[in-house]
Amino acid sequence: MLNIVIFGAPGSGKGTQSEFIIKKFGVNHISTGDVLRAEIKNNTELGKTAKGYIDQGQLVPDSLIIDILASVLDNLKESKGVIFDGFPRTIPQAEALKVMLNERGQDVSIMLDLDVPEEELITRLIKRGQECGRADDNMETIKKRLVVYNTQTSPLKDYYKKEGKYQYIKGLGTLESIFGDIVTAVEKL
Ligand code: AMP
C-alpha cells in the first residue's frame, strides 16, 4: 500500500500534484477540503458547520474532520493506497491517521512537503480566487489561512521527520519538474 501525505501551505500545489500522482501510481485521492466543499454545496448540517470555519480561514475542529476521514477510508474498497491531500493539518489529526492506518495493517509511506515561498503562495491564491471563485481565496482569508498553516500545520514537518517519513520537495519550477522530484522520492520507497 502506498499511502502518501501531500503537504504544504494553501496554494503550494497539493491538488495539482495529487492529480499527477493519482494517474501515475493509481492511488485513491482523499481531499478533506473537497469533501467539505461538497457538503457545503449539498447544504448538509456538516456543510453548514464547516462553512463557518472555512469562511473565517480557520480549521474545522479535529473531531469532525477525523470522523469524516474515518468514514471515507471505510468506504474505500479495493485500493492500491491513498493520497491524503489537506489532511492531516494538526498533530492530533496526524496521530489519528496513524492509528487508523495501523488498524488496517498500514502506515503513512511518505510525507511530501511542497515548499513554496509565501509571496508566491499569495499570488497563486489570488489568481485562483479570480479564476475559480473559491470563496476563501480572498486576501483577508488567505492571510488568516497562512497564519493557521504556520502555527498549527507546519509543526507536522517535525512530526513526520521523527517518523522518518519526511521528504522535502521544492514547490517552485515547472509542474513537470516538481512532479519529477515527487516520482523520484516515491520510487525510492
Ligand atoms: P483546502 O481545500 O485543503 O485548502 O481546505 C479548505 C478549508 O477547509 C481549510 O481552510 C479548512 O478550513 C478546511 N479544512 C480542510 N481540510 C482540513 C483539515 N484536515 N482540518 C481542518 N480543516 C480542514
Image (cartoon, grey):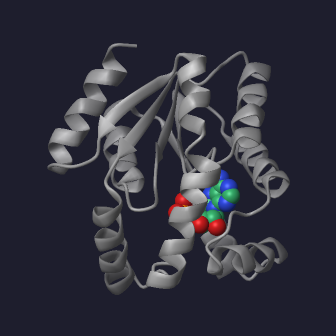
Q: Position of residue 180 (x, y in %)?
A: 20, 33
Kindly identify the residue that appears in the image at 51 percent across and 64 percent down: 146
Q: Position of residue 37 (x, y in %)?
A: 61, 72
Q: Number of labelled discs?
A: 0
Q: Position of residue 141 (x, y in %)?
A: 54, 79
Q: Quadrant of the N terminus?
A: top right
Task: Please give left or right for residue 46 compared with residue 105 in the image.
Answer: right
Kindly identify the residue that appears in the image at 28 percent across and 63 percent down: 120
Task: Please give left or right for residue 33 compared with residue 176 in the image.
Answer: right
Q: Quadrant of residue 170?
A: top left
Kindly identify the residue that appears in the image at 31 percent across and 55 percent down: 117
Report ligand 1 position as a quadrant: bottom right
Q: Nearer the viewer, residue 173 or 75?
A: 173
Q: Quadrant of residue 52?
A: bottom right
Q: Position of residue 78 (x, y in %)?
A: 60, 31
Q: Is residue 165 above or below residue 176?
A: above
Q: Quadrant of the C terminus?
A: top left
Q: Nearer the viewer, residue 53 or 68?
A: 53
Kindly identify the residue that appears in the image at 33 percent across and 13 percent down: 188
Q: Is residue 122 above or below residue 107?
A: below
Q: Nearer the viewer, residue 125 or 99?
A: 125
Q: Is residue 155 above or below residue 172?
A: above
Say whether residue 32 is visible: no
Q: Is residue 121 above or below residue 83?
A: below
Say whether residue 150 is visible: yes
